[in-house]
Amino acid sequence: MAPVDRYILQVTHPVQQNHYEFHIAQIFMDDEWKIPVRYAAYSWPKTAGAEPEVIEEYTYQSLKFNVGLTDDDFDVKHKDYNFHGK
């Protein structure tokens, strides 16, 4: 089995500052497709020695590729999407 750090990109801000939105962020990569399949961000610990808490997390499962989408499927003016203009 390969080392875990081969599949996870982790960013850590060791010192809390106003312009940082998280203490730790992790991006989990699919080994076969080399794409991100999970993201997790953690807050700074509330007390010394405490564990950081998850503040945001996304996991993608059962991904399908090349499903026949067209440029029209990504058009914000698409009639079926009901986007609100500014």
Image (spheres, grey):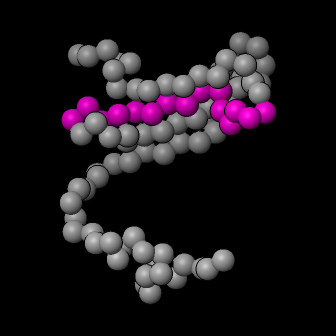
The spot of residue 85 in percent (x, y) is: 61, 80
Q: In this view, does 36 lie to the left or right of 56?
A: left
Asked whether residue 67 is drawn in magenta, I would say: no
The spot of residue 17 in percent (x, y) is: 77, 27
For residue 65, above or below residue 47: below
Q: Quadrant of the C terminus?
A: bottom right
* Residue located at (27% from left, 69% from top): 69
Magenta-tinted stretch? 18-32
Is residue 66 visible from the viewing direction of this image?
yes
Q: In which quarter of the image is residue 35?
A: top left
Q: In which quarter of the image is the N terminus?
A: top left
* Residue located at (53% from left, 42% from top): 57
Taken as a whole, is the magenta stretch helix, strand or loop? Answer: loop
For residue 56, above or below residue 24: below
**Going by the picture, which residue comes out furthest to the bottom?**
79
Q: In which quarter of the image is residue 6?
A: top left
Camera-side residue: 12 or 41?
12
* Residue located at (67% from left, 17% from top): 14
Q: Quadrant of residue 15?
A: top right
Is residue 53 visible from the viewing direction of this image?
no
